């Protein structure tokens, strides 16, 4: 399998050398990016002009959390270190920003309330006061609020970066699970101690700050602007030598150290930068919320980020943003799930979910086992069907399919897996899946056909359904597609034009696989351990 | 893994931790003496009570910590979801003594699950699920329970046992559905999945119980008041003060006997040391792992039930399991992760840290007390231990595989 | 099974027919044919990454067969789990011994007999192990990790014997042992073999292995390139150059 002797003869390699020599078209890419940016700005202007506060808020939140997830991915994805304390960094950044930018009347209210742990001194920590003290009194008016907010954000980022420095230190000694726990611990320590008497003078304890100016957090221009900045910095970092060093640390610490990569420097750098942007995101977050409260910085936040990163794809910034969009969608538009409905309707819902899940699983299994790809038309049909069902659901109340329409669009799910080219029943799919499908149909029918019968008229509130949905999504992703939807593929103009300059060819993939000796690299080889035993 | 004689040769006695321990002991004893001389309220009875209360709290944590340590020992996973299993155990107990009797349809479902769990437990002693005794017992339990659950209101002890078995089955299911497919996946994926399972359970709990507190007051003699006369003081408490440590001790002893004496227990220890070689001895490692989850979850459920008894109510499901879970995990790490006695020792230490310090540094006119820090203590101690001595008190040097 | 054809065929204990295995997209073993008869001692030789260990793992079931078949004691075995194969009479002495270092010597031996129920038989076999390896008996209650490499090798062999196997698979028993020990170990392997237990040894040290084996196979990049009686292999020119070294 020697490569060298075939260089001249392998047509694929010759072709690639030609394209590589043809240099990435930087000029063209830049123009395209600027053009796309313009289009995007127009789109934003259009959508915000629609007048839907919900949409605008969702967009802004997407950008804010985008900053958080992209920065978290710097550690989790690029460095390969599982960090679970991101909410702590956001807390520090958020509270710092809030404290520095809180308008004077809100400060006065805190003092007046008499229940606060804050003192005259700590309440007076504002940028306005700072400006006054150093002779910049002219910049303390309302028209310059934006400047002070920007500075407050930056300060928040710095404080968080400091915390990132501290949290980054254990990463030099610990690995894997233990490090993850330590980051989690730090996140919780930050939150728990913020309400204790040590820090309460600065944070106003459990009461927090109300009245944070929300023009900035809710503005798509501010949030997307900062997101753009974040993307710029992070992608520059990721595709530079620093980023490559970090990726090599992720792949094999010992080998990269042996090649001269300074582990400590890169790890701590990753933490500091990631924490900085988390702090900025925190500042925007408190602005979006309009207040700074400890309850908004629970571990739940980090969990959302984890779902976003894992579902989207830890290897690419595009993927992370996609995942963030998904999570934001569920969070902001998932309210219908948490309403109170009649039990019969819940049964219908569960039935539909089971049917879709069963069909998806059967299709996946047949695709995986028989080695053939699913015919493309079946994948398109499945996806289109899914989208139609989603549109017809209470999430978009404007479109109503009606019960008959609902049932019609469920039929493809029941039929597809049993078609000859598509489903492959020969390889013994577990009875559980068929049971799932069956139970789904039964549940659907029970719920749909006799809504008036006895206990079916009782109601039930879907409290926590969104969390359940996201959790199940994450579990499914981890089991079936741990690389995320997008995997490592990053969006680039070259990809759009199918230039595929940065993707390895099949031949190269094979050679890579052979080189990573399966005897030495267990993670590199496919699962050879007997995982089919009966538990 | 530790290879041959090198690991035994050099156990340098590091004097620093011992010095610290001595210092802490001196401070504590000094403080006790100070308080004793300060005020007659701080008499022997007071300290005795504080001592036993700390042991009681530590016992509760120990029941949870054992599950963490066992699972980590075999599959090197920090089972984030274990705190939630504890929560489910508590709520299941509540279900059984509050809402029984159930309609027969639901009773049958519960009975089926518990019968299955009992069969798994009996399997330890008889070797196989297909053994006639096991099958017969399963059938009997199924029918018997269906009848029971649909006709009577469960007493606490029966609710406890049923909840333990039910939660044990939950543990097996979680492993089979979420962790088993990831046996060969990188560790980060497994940890993320565990976090997801934890979140799922929390929200399922919210779905059923919403976010209100649930009172936990079954009719049981355990919460009857207890009065002890010690020296020239009185201890006013309830029987739980003695019952919880006792029950925990019994459970721990049974577990230890099981792990050390039975064949399946040996298989568990072997799998924890070297799973592939255990497989080569014919051990079904997946079954061993399932058993580990079964046992750990059963203990956690017991802990949950007694936790409810102890505090008289249950926090909302999204919160109940989080802090005890983390503290129990800290306990397992401090004691030495992978070691059963270590988990218990660590848990007792955490119990003391949380309870005894609050007792000897109480809130006074001039001093606001340490209560608001007590949760932070566990985290800080965890981080310190992980940085300084990750192998814990009992553990041998668990160097990461290089 | 065991149909008699015109040419009286010995019953095969283990047979690999055109076995091919993969690690993902890479082929590790290609069209491997091997046979082991009852009572034989067969060795498998080859350089690094020739697929020796993979062959052993395939026989054991730790690696799945992609193409081809495997038969053990007349039954089709390549779809069975590892535990099932152990139950049917295989035992293994893994590479680097892999004894349970935190368990006592006695417990290690008991683990070998994990799948057995007959207390009497287990005791008999343990006595036999003590006979073969008196040192093991001496250290019965010590933790496995406290023993030297050679002692661990003896324990590992004893552990394998505890399941009263029909076939013992050994992965590089000489690795990491002093030459004197290596001779000792192979003597004992021969002793065990003479009791009627088939032995399949994967070895780098071709000289020692061929000196006591009945037959041998040589693997190179996953294919069998040579096979035959041990004596023939010892005298084979290609073997001498590649594995046995010029004298």
Image (cartoon, grey):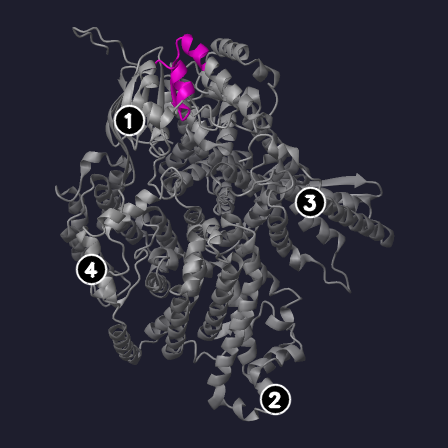
Residue, far front = C247
- Circles 3 and 4 on the same chain: no
In the picture of the structure, the residue carrying the numbered disc 1 is: C79
Query: Is residue B346 depicted above or below A15 in this figure?
Result: above
Residue, far bottom = A138
Which mark identifies residue B54?
3
Q: Is residue C195 magenta?
A: yes
* Residue A327 quadrant: bottom left
Query: Is residue B114 depicted above or below A161 in this figure?
Result: above
Q: Is residue B49 magenta?
A: no
Q: How far is the residue under mark 3 from the one under mark 4?
A: 59 Å
User: Callout 2: helix, strand or loop?
Assistant: loop
In the picture of the structure, the residue carrying the numbered disc 4 is: A388
Q: How far is the residue under mark 3 from the one under mark 2?
A: 55 Å
At which x and y percent is residue A217?
A: 43, 76
Q: Bounds of the magenta span?
A: C189-215
In the picture of the structure, the residue carrying the numbered disc 2 is: A134
């Amino acid at each position: 399998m020697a490569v060298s002797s075939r260089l001249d003869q392998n047509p694929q390699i010759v072709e690639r050398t030609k394209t590589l020599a043809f240099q990435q078209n930087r000029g063209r890419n830049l123009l395209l990016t600027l053009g796309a940016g313009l289009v995007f700005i127009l789109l934003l202007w259009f959508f915000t002009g629609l007048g839907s506060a919900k949409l605008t808020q969702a967009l802004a939140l997407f950008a804010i959390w985008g900053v958080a997830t992209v920065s978290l991915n710097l550690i989790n994805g690029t460095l390969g270190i599982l960090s679970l304390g991101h909410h702590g960094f956001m807390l520090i950044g958020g509270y710092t920003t809030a404290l520095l930018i809180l308008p004077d009347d809100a400060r006065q209210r805190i003092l007046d309330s008499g229940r606060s742990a804050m003192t005259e001194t700590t309440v007076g920590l504002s940028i306005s006061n700072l400006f006054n003290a150093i002779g910049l009194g002219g910049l303390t008016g309302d028209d310059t609020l934006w400047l002070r907010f920007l500075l407050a954000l930056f300060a928040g980022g710095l404080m968080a970066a400091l915390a990132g420095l501290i949290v980054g230190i254990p990463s030099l000694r610990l690995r894997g699970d233990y490090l993850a726990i330590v980051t989690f611990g730090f996140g919780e320590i930050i939150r728990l101690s913020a309400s204790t008497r040590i820090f309460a003078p600065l944070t106003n304890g459990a009461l927090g700050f109300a009245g944070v100016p929300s023009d900035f957090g809710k503005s798509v221009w501010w949030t997307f602007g900062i997101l753009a900045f974040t993307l710029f910095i992070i992608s520059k970092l990721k595709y530079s030598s620093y980023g490559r060093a970090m990726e090599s640390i992720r792949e094999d610490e010992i080998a990269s150290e042996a090649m001269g990569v300074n582990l400590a420097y890169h790890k701590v750098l990753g933490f500091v930068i990631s924490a900085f942007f988390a702090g900025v995101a925190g500042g925007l977050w408190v602005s979006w919320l309009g207040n700074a409260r400890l309850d908004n910085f629970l571990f739940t936040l980090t969990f959302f980020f984890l779902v976003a990163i894992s579902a989207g794809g830890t290897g690419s910034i595009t993927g992370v943003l996609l995942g963030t969009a998904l999570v934001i969608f569920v969070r902001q538009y998932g309210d219908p799930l948490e309403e109170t409905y009649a039990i019969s309707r819940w049964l219908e819902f569960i039935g539909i979910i089971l049917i879709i899940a069963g069909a998806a699983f059967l299709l996946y299994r047949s695709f995986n086992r028989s080695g053939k790809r699913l015919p493309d038309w079946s994948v398109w049909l499945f996806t289109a069907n899914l989208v139609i069902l989603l549109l017809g659901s209470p999430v978009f109340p404007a479109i109503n399919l009606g019960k008959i329409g609902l049932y019609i669009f469920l039929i493809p799910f029941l039929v597809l897996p049993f078609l000859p080219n598509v489903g492959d029943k020969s390889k013994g799919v577990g009875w559980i899946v068929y049971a799932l499908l069956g139970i789904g149909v039964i549940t659907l029918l029970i719920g749909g056909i006799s809504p008036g019968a006895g206990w079916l008229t009782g109601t039930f509130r879907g409290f926590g359904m969104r969390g359940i949905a996201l959790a199940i999504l994450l579990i499914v992703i981890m089991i079936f597609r741990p690389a995320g939807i997008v995997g490592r593929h990053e969006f680039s103009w070259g990809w759009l034009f199918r230039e595929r300059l940065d993707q390895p060819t099949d031949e190269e993939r094979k050679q890579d696989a052979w080189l990573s000796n399966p005897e030495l690299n267990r993670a590199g080889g496919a699962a050879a351990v007997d995982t089919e035993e009966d538990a | 893994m530790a290879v041959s004689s090198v690991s035994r040769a050099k156990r340098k006695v590091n004097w620093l931790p011992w010095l610290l321990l001595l210092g802490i002991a001196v401070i504590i004893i000094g403080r006790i003496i100070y308080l004793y001389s300060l005020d007659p309220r701080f008499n022997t009875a007071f300290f005795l009570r504080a001592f036993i209360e700390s042991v009681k709290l530590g016992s509760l944590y120990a029941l949870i910590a054992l599950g963490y340590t066992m699972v980590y020992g075999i599959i090197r996973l920090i089972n984030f979801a274990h705190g939630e299993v504890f929560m489910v155990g508590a709520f299941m107990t509540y279900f059984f003594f509050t809402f029984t009797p159930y309609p027969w349809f639901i009773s049958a479902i519960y009975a089926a699950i518990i019968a299955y769990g009992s069969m798994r437990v009996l399997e330890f002693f008889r070797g196989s699920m297909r053994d006639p005794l096991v099958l017969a017992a399963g059938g009997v339990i199924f029918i018997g329970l269906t009848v029971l659950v649909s006709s009577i209101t469960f007493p606490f002890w029966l609710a406890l046992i049923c909840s333990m078995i039910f939660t044990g089955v939950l543990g097996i299911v979680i492993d089979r559905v979420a962790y088993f497919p990831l046996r060969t996946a990188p560790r980060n994926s497994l940890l993320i999945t565990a976090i997801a399972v934890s979140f799922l359970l929390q929200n399922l709990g919210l779905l059923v119980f919403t976010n209100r507190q649930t009172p936990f007051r079954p009719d049981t003699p355990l919460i009857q008041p207890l009065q002890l006369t010690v020296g020239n003081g009185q201890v006013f408490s309830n029987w739980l003060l003695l019952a919880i440590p006792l029950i925990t001790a019994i459970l721990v002893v049974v577990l230890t006997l099981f792990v050390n004496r039975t064949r399946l227990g040996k298989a568990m220890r072997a799998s924890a040391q070297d799973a592939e070689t255990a497989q080569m001895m014919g051990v079904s490692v997946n079954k061993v792992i399932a058993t580990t989850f079964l046992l750990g979850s059963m203990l956690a459920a017991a802990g949950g039930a007694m936790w409810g008894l102890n505090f008289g109510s249950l926090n909302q499901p999204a919160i109940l399991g989080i802090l005890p879970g983390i503290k129990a995990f800290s306990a397992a790490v401090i004691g030495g992760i992978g070691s059963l006695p270590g988990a218990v020792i660590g848990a007792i230490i955490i119990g003391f840290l949380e309870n005894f310090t609050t007792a000897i540094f109480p809130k006074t006119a001039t001093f606001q007390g340490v209560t608001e820090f007590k949760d932070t203590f566990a985290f800080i101690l965890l981080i310190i231990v992980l940085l300084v001595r990750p192998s814990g008190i009992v553990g041998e040097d668990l160097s990461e595989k290089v | 099974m065991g149909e008699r054809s015109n040419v009286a065929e010995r019953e095969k204990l283990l047979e690999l027919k055109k076995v091919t295995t993969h690690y993902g997209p890479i082929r590790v073993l290609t069209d491997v044919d091997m046979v082991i008869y009852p009572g034989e001692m067969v060795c498998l030789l080859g350089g690094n990454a020739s697929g020796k260990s993979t062959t052993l793992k395939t026989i054991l079931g730790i690696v799945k067969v992609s193409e081809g078949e495997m038969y053990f004691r007349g039954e089709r075995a390549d779809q069975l789990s590892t535990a099932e194969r152990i139950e049917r009479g295989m035992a293994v002495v893994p590479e680097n011994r892999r004894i349970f270092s935190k368990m006592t010597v006695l417990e290690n031996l008991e683990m070998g007999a994990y799948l057995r129920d007959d207390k009497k038989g287990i005791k008999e076999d343990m006595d036999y192990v003590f006979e073969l390896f008196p040192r093991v008996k001496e250290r019965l209650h010590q933790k496995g990790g406290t023993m030297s490499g050679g002692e661990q090798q003896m324990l590992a062999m004893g552990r394998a014997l505890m399941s009263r196997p029909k076939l013992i698979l050994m992965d590089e028993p000489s690795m990491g042992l002093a030459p004197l020990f290596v001779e000792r170990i192979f003597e004992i392997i021969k002793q065990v073999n003479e009791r009627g237990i088939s032995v399949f040894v994967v070895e780098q040290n071709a000289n020692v292995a061929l000196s006591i084996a009945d037959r041998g196979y040589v693997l190179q990049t996953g294919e069998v390139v040579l096979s035959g009686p041990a004596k023939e292999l010892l005298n084979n020119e290609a073997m001498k150059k590649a594995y046995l070294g010029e004298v």
